[in-house]
Every structure is written in structure tokens, then in C-alpha cells.
């Protein structure tokens, strides 16, 4: 990495990563630009504080050979794989894959093969420019992993995000929403197009899904047209997951009640407000008929309240600043 701000973000992220590791963990480090090379093999987690210095040994050569880096990382991950452990590859990159075989389909197949061998694949994108977000997020999805953006204001929260992957409380988490046609007319799931599963795969535990830590939450938003003269509740939502403490599958279902005087967004809890604003911004940036119907100025009081409530949270402030810029 040539730019100093990206090197600084990378070093902070690695320092945060080191806080998650213990003497029982092992880390193998590969540096890559035009070609990958092994920097440390089976480094004990107690020595993880050396990670920033190790990464700085890789000089920038003006290219990103993601294909060769994944190949070497795969070989080493399979060699060091331990049964009963969290076996993961974490890719840090600040650029687009522009060398080697960068065909997205081929890269996805390699990462999916790792997932089938119980090795997950996480990606941390350093900086907010020169990144192929579509490619990187797709690769992480195929690897049962996560895609993180690590910048100047987000590197300090990287450990908290990665902890959700390293220490999941629930695996293979799936959500199914069934809407009552007697109460709901038209409806639309906003986002998650690439993450949707077939209805019959909800209870097919061989079809892998997400992981969540104990303090994490997943949010999905539906746009629905309720039928005031209809009957019954809106529907029901079911969650199915594997409990990591016991290894058993758990399934729970809740009713979605119909309230003719449903509360507005400014009356929701702050976390729901943030999640809703994030989804509205994403839809606004995507464009289309729904984006044209979204007026973020309508939520100015909510935005102002959240800015005060999360005054010490840089990541949230960044999101709210984006919301205000789009008003």
C-alpha cells in the first residue's frame, strides 16, 4: 500500500485484530502485490502484535494479483486446518484485482470450494476508492464470510465486527417472512437480492447461511401495502439457526401484528431508526422509482436526534452525514 492513510488504517485494523487472538490461536501471514509471498507461518496468537510490522515488509509493486494470493492462502489454510476451530482467511486489500486471472466466477468457485471444506473467507477493503465493492462483497458471500470497509474513521471498530465472525453465537442463520394475503396486498423486500434463498431451503440445513455474534443484529426491511378492510395479522417471521454452544438447530416464530395506527419512524428505537436510514440511503443511491419516492428531508428531526445520541460514534456520524448530503 503506497498511501500513508491506507497504511495507517491497515495498521490500526491489524492492531485491533491482534486483540482478538490468544496463545491458542495461530496466524499465517501472506503479503501480496504482483506476487504473493509468505511472511509468517503459524505465528502464535500471543505474538499477533507483530502483524503491522510484518505487513509493512510487503512493498507495493503497482498491481493486485488476487488470484495468486487466494491460491497460496488456500494451500496454507488447508494445510493448517484444525477440526473444531474457526478456520478463516482474512483478505486485506486496497485495490481492484487487476493482475492474474481476475474472472469473478472463477474466483468465486475457488472460495466456495474453501467454504465446503469448512474454511471461511472474510475481506477487509482498505480505503473507499479503487475498490471493486461488487466483486469483493460477492467473494465474501461465497466464502460464508463478511466484507468490511476499513477507512480512517472505521479501523478502530474493525475488531468488534470481526469478533462476530471469530466468535459466532449462531451459525447458519436464516429468516423467513410469510405475509398474510388477506391483510397485505403488494410488498417488496428492499435489498438482499443476492442473499435470498429458495423457500424450501429454509429448513434445508445443508444450505449454508449467515453467522451472528451475541451482540449483533440483522435487519431486513419490507415495503408493504396493507389492506385496511382485510382480515388477520400482517403475517409471521421465523428464524432458524444452529446454536454454537450445543450444535443443535433452533427454530422460532413470531406473529407480525397488524396495527391500523402503526407508529412512525421517529417513535422507533434508535437502532431501528439507524438501520432504516441506512436502507433508505442505499435505495436512494441505487436509483429507480422507489428512490424517487424517498424524501430524506422528512426524517430531519430523527437525524438530528441520532446525531446527538451517537455523537461519539464516528461510523454512525459518517452515515448520518451521508444522509444529510442526500437530503
Image (cartoon, rainbow, N blue to C red):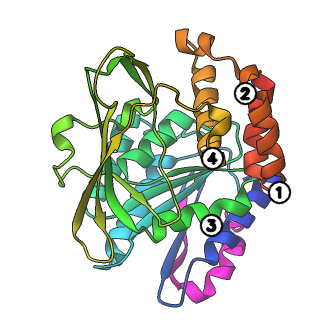
Q: CA distance from mark 4 to mark 3?
A: 25 Å
* Residue that numbered label 1 is attached to: 312
Q: Position of residue 260 (x, y in %)?
A: 46, 25
Count of numbered badges drawn on the protein: 4
Q: Is residue 48 magenta?
A: yes
Q: CA distance from mark 1 to mark 4?
A: 18 Å
Q: Is residue 298 rendered to the left or right of residue 281?
A: right
Q: Position of residue 247 (x, y in %)?
A: 24, 72
Which disc number belongs to residue 159?
A: 3
Along the line of sight, the residue nearer the viewer: 50 or 267: 267
Could you say whether the residue bearing mark 2 is in a helix, strand or loop?
Answer: helix
Are circles 1 and 2 on residues that touch, CB within 8 Å? no
Q: Quadrant of residue 109?
A: top left
Mark 1 is surrounded, within 10 Å at the Cα level, by few (under 14), some (14 to 19) or many (20 or more) other residues, namely: few
Residue 255 seen in the figure: yes
Residue 100 seen in the figure: no
Q: Position of residue 278 (x, y in %)?
A: 62, 36
Mark 4 is surrounded, within 10 Å at the Cα level, by few (under 14), some (14 to 19) or many (20 or more) other residues, namely: few
Q: Residue at x 47, y 69 (%)?
A: 166
Label located before the other in sequence (3 or 2):
3
Callout in the foreground (1, 4) = 4
* Residue that numbered label 4 is attached to: 269
Label located before the other in sequence (1 or 4):
4
Q: CA distance from mark 1 to mark 3?
A: 18 Å
Label located before the other in sequence (4 or 3):
3
Q: Residue at x 62, y 47 (%)?
A: 269
Could you say whether the residue bearing mark 4 is in a helix, strand or loop?
Answer: loop
Q: Is residue 20 above or below residue 169?
A: below
Callout in the foreground (1, 3) = 1
Mark 2 is surrounded, within 10 Å at the Cα level, by few (under 14), some (14 to 19) or many (20 or more) other residues, namely: some
Amino acid at each position: 500500500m503506497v498511501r500513508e492513510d491506507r497504511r495507517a488504517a491497515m495498521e490500526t485494523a491489524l492492531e485491533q485484530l491482534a486483540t482478538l487472538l490468544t496463545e491458542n490461536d495461530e496466524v499465517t501471514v501472506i503479503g501480496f502485490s504482483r506476487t504473493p509471498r509468505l511472511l509468517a507461518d503459524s505465528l502464535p496468537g500471543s505474538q499477533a502484535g507483530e502483524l503491522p510490522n510484518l505487513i509493512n515488509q510487503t512493498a507495493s509493486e503497482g498491481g493486485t494479483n488476487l488470484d495468486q494470493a487466494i491460491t497460496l492462502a488456500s494451500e496454507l489454510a488447508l494445510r493448517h486446518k484444525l477440526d473444531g476451530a474457526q478456520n478463516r482467511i482474512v483478505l486485506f486489500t486496497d485495490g481492484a484485482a487487476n493482475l492474474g486471472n481476475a474472472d469473478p466466477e472463477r474466483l468465486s468457485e475457488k472460495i466456495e470450494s474453501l467454504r465446503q471444506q469448512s474454511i471461511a473467507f472474510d475481506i477487509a477493503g482498505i480505503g473507499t476508492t479503487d475498490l471493486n465493492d461488487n466483486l469483493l462483497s460477492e467473494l465474501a458471500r461465497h466464502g460464508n464470510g463478511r466484507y468490511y470497509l476499513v477507512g480512517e474513521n472505521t479501523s478502530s471498530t474493525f475488531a468488534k465486527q470481526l469478533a462476530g465472525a471469530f466468535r459466532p453465537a449462531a451459525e447458519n442463520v436464516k429468516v423467513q417472512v410469510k405475509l398474510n394475503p388477506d391483510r397485505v396486498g403488494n410488498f417488496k423486500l428492499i435489498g438482499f437480492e443476492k442473499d435470498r434463498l429458495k423457500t424450501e431451503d429454509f429448513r434445508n440445513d445443508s444450505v449454508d447461511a449467515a453467522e451472528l455474534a451475541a451482540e449483533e443484529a440483522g435487519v431486513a426491511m419490507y415495503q408493504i401495502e396493507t389492506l385496511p378492510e382485510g382480515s388477520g395479522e400482517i403475517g409471521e417471521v421465523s428464524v432458524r439457526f444452529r446454536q454454537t454452544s450445543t450444535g443443535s438447530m433452533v427454530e422460532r416464530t413470531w406473529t407480525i401484528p397488524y396495527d391500523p395506527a402503526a407508529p412512525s419512524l421517529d417513535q422507533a428505537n434508535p437502532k431501528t431508526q439507524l438501520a432504516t436510514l441506512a436502507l433508505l440511503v442505499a435505495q436512494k443511491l441505487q436509483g429507480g422509482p422507489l428512490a424517487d419516492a424517498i424524501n430524506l428531508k422528512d426524517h430531519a428531526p430523527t437525524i438530528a436526534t441520532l446525531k446527538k445520541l451517537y455523537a461519539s460514534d464516528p461510523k454512525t456520524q459518517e452515515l448520518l452525514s451521508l444522509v444529510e448530503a442526500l437530503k
